C-alpha cells in the first residue's frame, strides 16, 4: 500500500532578483535570471521613470523609485548591476552592505583599489559576488581547459588571443563607453580585453606575469567629442607564469568583425583554438594533422558535459553561456560550489591587468602584473 503523505512540502522559495539598469545587458541578465527560475522582483535605475520603463520592457514585477529603495527591500536576495562602468563599484558596495548577493557587470570597478575593497567586503560578508566573464561557460571553452589541464597538449609554449569588433568603426558612432566619466579610463581593453584575458588565463590555467602594451585612439574626435581619451584598440605582448609568450589584439574598430573573441594556445604537442563566434567546436592541431571537435556531450569532459544542455547538433550560443553563468551563481547562493564561477577576485584580477595595460601604454615599458 503506498503511503499517502499529508505533509505539503513547500516549494523552495525562488530567488528574488533585482536588476539595476535597463539596457542591453540588463535584458541579457533578466533572460538568464528567468531561465534560472528566479522571480524578477525589482527594477531600479537612475530615475523612477527609467526603472518603470525597464520593468515594463523586461517583465520585472516592480519598479523602485531608487536603487536605495530596492536595496532596502528584504525580499530581494540578489542584485544584478547592469549600469555604466563608473557606477559599478558604488552599487556593488551598497548592495553588499545591504546584505545582498551581487552579480556585477564587468569591469567590477574602474580601479584595482576599488575592486580589491569590493572583493574583501564580499568575503567578509560571506556573500556570493560574481562577475559575468561568461565566455568561460561555452561548453567547448571548458573542453579546451580540460584538454590543457589533462596534459595531452603538452606544456604551454605560446598563446595568441584576439577580440575584434566593429561597432565603433564609424567615427560618428558613439556610446557611454567612449566617455571616461562613464566608461572609466580604459575602453576597449576594460570592455572586451577583460574577457579575452580572463578566458586566456582560465583556459590555460596560467597567469600573465608581465606585459607590454600599446593603445591607439584612431578617432580622437569621435562623434564630435572633444579629444577622446579612451582607446579604440590595444596590442599586447605577454609572458605567462609557465614561460609561454604570446600576443593579444583587442579592437572595437575592426570592420567586419562583430564579436570575434579567439584564444589559441599551443602546447608542445597540440594547439587548441576556440572561436567564440563558432562556439560549438574546437580546432585541435597537431604536426600529423588537425581536427575540428564538435560539441557532443557523450564525448566531452565532465565539466563541459555539465554545461551541455542539449545534444550534439543542437547549437548552443551566447545566451546559453550567460544562462549557465547565472544558474551557477544562483547555485552558489544556495550553497553549491560550482567549478569556474568568476567572482569578485576575478574582477580584481581584471582591474589589475587593465591598470598594467594602461601603465605600459603610457610608459612604453614592460609592466609586471600584480598577482
Ligand atoms: C560591447 O563591447 C559588448 O557588449 C561588451 O560590453 C560585452 O561585455 C561583450 O560580451 C560584447 O560586447
Image: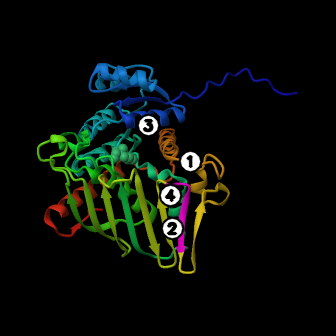
Badge 1: residue crowd in 10 Å (few <14, some 14–19, many ≥20): many
- Residue 173 horizontal side relative to residue 312, left or right: left
Residue 141 — which label?
4
Q: Determine whether the residue tagged by mark 1 lies in a helix, strand or loop.
A: loop
Residue 28 — which label?
3
Q: Determine whether the residue tagged by mark 4 lies in a helix, strand or loop.
A: helix
- Residue 32 horizontal side relative to residue 70, left or right: right
Alpha-carbon span between mark 1 and mark 2: 24 Å
Split into 4 quadrants, where in the image is the N terminus?
Answer: top right
Q: Are marks 3 and 2 in contact (CB under 8 Å)?
A: no
Badge 4: residue crowd in 10 Å (few <14, some 14–19, many ≥20): many
Kindly identify the residue that appears in the image at 50 percent across and 62 percent down.
Answer: 145
Alpha-carbon span between mark 3 and mark 2: 31 Å
Q: Residue 251 or 349: which is nearer the viewer?
A: 251
Alpha-carbon span between mark 4 and mark 1: 12 Å
Work out whether mark 3 precedes mark 1 in sequence or the reverse, and give the earlier one. Answer: 3
Work out whether mark 3 precedes mark 2 in sequence or the reverse, and give the earlier one. Answer: 3
Q: Is residue 7 in view from this perspective?
A: yes
Amino acid at each position: 500500500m503506498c503511503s499517502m503523505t499529508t505533509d505539503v512540502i513547500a516549494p523552495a522559495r525562488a530567488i528574488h532578483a533585482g536588476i539595476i539598469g535597463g539596457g542591453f545587458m540588463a535584458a541579457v541578465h533578466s533572460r538568464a535570471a528567468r531561465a534560472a527560475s528566479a522571480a524578477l522582483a525589482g527594477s531600479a535605475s537612475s530615475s523612477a521613470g527609467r526603472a518603470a520603463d525597464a520593468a515594463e520592457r523586461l517583465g520585472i514585477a516592480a519598479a523602485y523609485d531608487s536603487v536605495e529603495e530596492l536595496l532596502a527591500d528584504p525580499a530581494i536576495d540578489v542584485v544584478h548591476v547592469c549600469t555604466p562602468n563608473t557606477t559599478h563599484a558604488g552599487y556593488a558596495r551598497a548592495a553588499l552592505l545591504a546584505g545582498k548577493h551581487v552579480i556585477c557587470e564587468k569591469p567590477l570597478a574602474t580601479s584595482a583599489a576599488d575592486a580589491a575593497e569590493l572583493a574583501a567586503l564580499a568575503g567578509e560578508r560571506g556573500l556570493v559576488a560574481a562577475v559575468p566573464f561568461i565566455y568561460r561557460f561555452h561548453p567547448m571553452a571548458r573542453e579546451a581547459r580540460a584538454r590543457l589541464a589533462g596534459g595531452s597538449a603538452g606544456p604551454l609554449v605560446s598563446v595568441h588571443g584576439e577580440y575584434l569588433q566593429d561597432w565603433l568603426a564609424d567615427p560618428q558612432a558613439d556610446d557611454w563607453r567612449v566617455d571616461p566619466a562613464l566608461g572609466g579610463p580604459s575602453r576597449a581593453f576594460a570592455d572586451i580585453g577583460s574577457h579575452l584575458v580572463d578566458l586566456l588565463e582560465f583556459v590555460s590555467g596560467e597567469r600573465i606575469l608581465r606585459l607590454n602594451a600599446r593603445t591607439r585612439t584612431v578617432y580622437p574626435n569621435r562623434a564630435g567629442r572633444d579629444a577622446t581619451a579612451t582607446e579604440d584598440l590595444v596590442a599586447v605582448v605577454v609572458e605567462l607564469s609557465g614561460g609561454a609568450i604570446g600576443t593579444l589584439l583587442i579592437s572595437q574598430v575592426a570592420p567586419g568583425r562583430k564579436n570575434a573573441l579567439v584564444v589559441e594556445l599551443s602546447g608542445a604537442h597540440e594547439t587548441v583554438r576556440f572561436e567564440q563566434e563558432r562556439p560549438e567546436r574546437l580546432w585541435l592541431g597537431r604536426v600529423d594533422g588537425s581536427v575540428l571537435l564538435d560539441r557532443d556531450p557523450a564525448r566531452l569532459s565532465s565539466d563541459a558535459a555539465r554545461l551541455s544542455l542539449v545534444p550534439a547538433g543542437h547549437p548552443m550560443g551566447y545566451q546559453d553561456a550567460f544562462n549557465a553563468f547565472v544558474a551557477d551563481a544562483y547555485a552558489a547562493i544556495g550553497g553549491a560550489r560550482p567549478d569556474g564561477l568568476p567572482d569578485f577576485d576575478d574582477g580584481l584580477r581584471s582591474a589589475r591587468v587593465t591598470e598594467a595595460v594602461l601603465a605600459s601604454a603610457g610608459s612604453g615599458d614592460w609592466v609586471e602584473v600584480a598577482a
